[in-house]
Amino acid sequence: YLYKWQGKNTSLNPFILMAHQDVVPIEESSKEMWTVEPFAGTIKDGFIWGRGTTDDKINLISIMESAEKLLKDGYQPERTVYFVFGHDEELGGKKGAVKIVQTLQSRHIKADIIIDEGGIVTQIEVPGVKDNKPIALIGTVEKGYMSLEFSVHKKGGHSSQPEEETAIDILTKAIVKLRANPFEKHFVQSTQDFISYLAPDMKFPNNMAFANPWLFKGMILKQYEKSNKANAMIRTTAVPTIINAGIKDNVIPALATSIVNFRLLPGDSANYVMQKVKEIINDERVVIKPYDDNISEASPTTSINSIAFKLVDSIVKKSYDHVLSAPFLLIGATDSRHFTPISDNIIKFSPMVDPIGFHGIDERVSLESYQHSLWFFEQFLRSCK
Ligand SMILES: [Zn+2]
């Protein structure tokens, strides 16, 4: 859906608020592990429970609720606001966000600020903060996405007289080699900014390291490597997600394939990564090609000096007590990446505090988060001037 809320001053570029309507499914086998019916939207123990509550219903509902509240009050924003609600974000956004951005482009619309889902407010994701202050992770950039297919063709045969190397052997060796040779690690701009924003509020010794990253770069990078999430922020990652070969226990298959998923660090283009993968594997028997056309480069980085970052930052500071904030590299993909052609100022932020069960079991978001989220979007809409 694309909604337009006409502003008073048509000479100003619009702002855009985004959220996606679709959710990921529930695995049949995990249904029994849920405390509540996953699609009932139960409110219990101070939380709203259910699939999609954190991703991305909280933003979707908060945006619509706050707009309706302001409409009832007779409020009209100074500049026009568009609401963009895609329906296939979890599938790449091809039929939703992509079509909507094409429509906006055909109308020659440029947006001064776009906000979509992304970083959260957290007291647990960043350890070592003084007084356990919450941190708002304001997404300014997101990693790219690509899947490659590896395939090995080799004459199969009877398993009673195997060759020294089969298609399965060659394929698995290639995967092991790839996993054993991780991509170059380094701090992108947003992570450097993240570190310098938080330095004054870190406990010893992180405060010292964060305040002098040029001196402690090696040490910080090593620390980052220890956690899966932090590791994903300093390099392009690669992981096999599908593997296929064989039909019968006594037949050596003639074909073995695997799909490997890559998340591209800003600066590592899809092309570069594909070449690098071929270099690492260095075996012509392994044919490497894109798995599908769902490839996106890492997004450009929204400047911390932009009006978008400054506005979101100032609303966040008013929404939560003693909150810290920092620019942030998002490791997941969002619909907002498709909007790069119409705006340089895209912020990826979901105003909720440490949601639980994202894409998993017992997904839920606190009523308090919902309250904050409503307030955040109301303040944002009131700032559309
Ligand atoms: Zn989402």
Image (cartoon, helix red, strand yellow):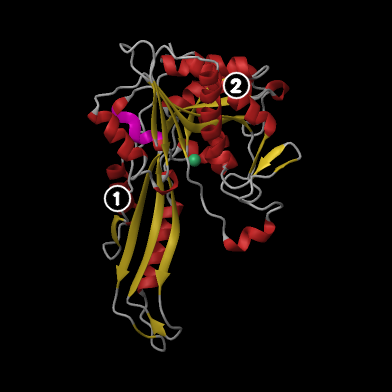
Q: Secondary structure at mark 1?
A: loop
The kind of residue on which mark 1 rests is Asp
Q: Nearer the viewer, residue 347 or 331?
A: 347
Rendered image: mark on residue 317: none
Q: Residue at x 67, y 28 (%)?
A: 128
Query: What residue span does the magenta drawing correspond to?
Result: 336-341
Q: Is residue 19 magenta?
A: no
Q: Position of residue 2 (x, y in %)?
A: 38, 33
Residue 235 placement: quadrant: top left
Mark 2 or mark 1, which is nearer the start of the sequence?
1
Q: Residues within 10 Å of mark 2 (few under 14, many from 20)?
A: many
Q: Quadrant of the N terminus?
A: top left
Q: Position of residue 259 (x, y in %)?
A: 39, 59
The kind of residue on which mark 2 rests is Trp
Q: Is residue 297 visible?
A: no
Q: Secondary structure at mark 2?
A: helix
Q: Residue at x 23, y 30 (%)?
A: 106
Q: Is residue 106 visible?
A: yes
Rendered image: mark on residue 375: 2
- 1 or 2: mark nearer the eye: 2
Relative to 267, residue 379 above or below = above
Residue assigned mark 1: 293
Q: Residues within 10 Å of mark 1 (few under 14, many from 20)?
A: few
